[in-house]
Image: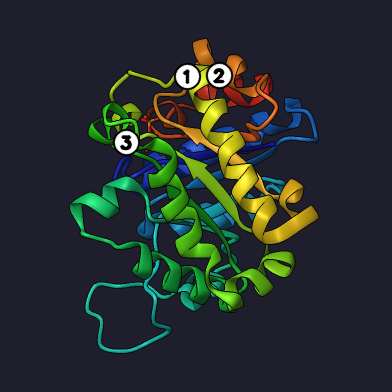
Amino acid sequence: MLIAGNWKMNLMPHEGMMLTHEICMGISDIPSHVDILICPPFTHLAQCSLIIENNESPLLIGAQNCHDSDEGAFTGEISASMLASMGIDYVILGHSERRFLFNESNDFIARKCLTAFKAGLTPIVCIGETLEQRNKGIVHPVIQEQVLSILHHEQIVSSISAHNIVFAYEPVWAIGTGLAASPEQAEDVHAFIRLQLEEKLGDHASMIDVIYGGSVKLENAKDYFLQPNIDGALIGGASLNAESFLAIAAQA
Ligand code: PGA
């Protein structure tokens, strides 16, 4: 089980440090089968990593994005190897906010995924349909296209066993809206994702965490975790408070 917090562009550095410290303090109460990950903004990563290190905490740390090139003239961008050099473990790729607000394509996200692998990071690839696509009844084809755009790359498939990959199913209409997908709606898509993974990766598919995101909170978390193909959660709003984040993790 993986419980990941996506802080997005929230919290000033001192607030992020405080939150990291509080999570480190509470993590010993969480069962050991649950991995806990925080994804602060780039500017907070060094300080938050240091807090984790100083506390000898099992808390994992990830970034919210990286570029698809390893270096070069890309003003304002951060490379996967820069993140890896700071002891970062994971990177969120293709979050719907980046797909829609920054026009990121499936192809660009696949290239980022390759660079992340090369740097030794584990990518968390976000996929999900819009409300319009759901209403049109094309959820599975949309999800299939997003998953296959990653798994079409031979190099990605061959890197998965070494570096691992996580898929986060995040229906766009459920993110930050309070309109969470029902556990049954989520399970239907997760089972479909697992099928795609099995077709491409065989037995290794069962090792890959497929986590749900979109308005996860303490009140609904357990119902997701009871579903056979839901291996955790990617949490936005409710990850900005140690008590609510850890309480969700305790349900996993
Ligand atoms: P939310 O965000 O939990 O605030 O809906 C989830 C996400 O965007 O990853």
Q: Is mark 1 within 8 Å of ligand 1?
A: yes
**Which residue is disc 1 drawn over?**
217
Q: Residue at x 64, y 43 (%)?
A: 194
Q: Residue at x 78, y 28 (%)?
A: 31
Q: Nearer the viewer, mark 2 or mark 3?
A: 3
Label at residue 128: none
Left or right side of 183 for 44: left
Q: Position of residue 236 (x, y in %)?
A: 40, 34
Horizontally, is 213 left or right of 67 in the view?
right
Asked which secondary structure carries label 1, the reply is loop
User: Residue at left 58%, top 71%?
Assistant: 156
Q: Quadrant of ligand 1?
A: top left
Between the C-alphas of marks 1 and 3, the distance is 17 Å
Q: Which residue is mark 3?
A: 172
Element type where label 3 sits in the image: helix
Within 10 angstroms of label 3, few (less than 14), some, or many (20 or more) residues? many
Percent position of residue 192, x then y: 57, 39
What is the count of numbered marks? Answer: 3
